[in-house]
Amino acid sequence: MFLGVSNINLDAKGRLAMPTRYRDFLTQHCNGEMVITLDLFDKCLLIYPRPAWNDLEREIIALPNFDPRARQVQRIMLGHASEVQMDSNGRVQVSQPLREIIGLDKKAVFSGQGKKFELWDEETYRNSRETWKVDPASVADLPPEVTALSI
């Protein structure tokens, strides 16, 4: 389970060092193999360990091709997916096109999201945080799965 936020830096080649607390798990669980792709809703990247990506990929491929919204999901998630391998120093290469799309330069935020990670440009992350707060007046508009949670 990936949890927590870490501030990290990308080097001049676009590599990031995976937070130390996840390296052993990633090595044992997926031999350091991951997939990086674009998020559907936010200006960030998603990093999946290979087994989690394989499950999601099957579901995305199975979406109906005659539905334009499903094809849009496929274009974003599959079309921008990049296979990566964590090196012996715990680093992962983030492709130039993906970095350019989200405006990622050097300073980044790495956020554990359960089965995956989010990778944000630090400034974009900072600017987006305020929009994530749930307005108490809009709780009724939340999906039933969320309102059923006992938080």
Image (tube, grey):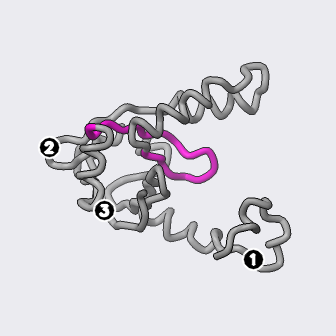
For label 1, the residue is: 135
Determine which quarter of the picture holds residue 32: top left
How packed mark 2 is, by other alpha carbons closer than 10 Å (few <14, some 14-19, many 20 or more), is few
Sequence-wise first label, 2 or 1: 2
Whole-percent x, y for residue 10 in the image: 28, 54
- Residue at horizontal 42%, vertical 57%? 1
Amino acid beneath label 1: Asp
Amino acid beneath label 3: Ile
Q: Is residue 17 left or right of residue 70?
A: left
For label 3, the residue is: 8
Whole-percent x, y for residue 111 in the image: 43, 61
Instruction: Verify whether residue 44 appears in magenta.
Output: yes
Q: Of tags 3 and 2, which is closer to the observer? A: 2
Amino acid beneath label 2: Ser
For label 2, the residue is: 88
- Locate the C terminus by quadrant: bottom right
> Which stretch appears magenta?
31-47
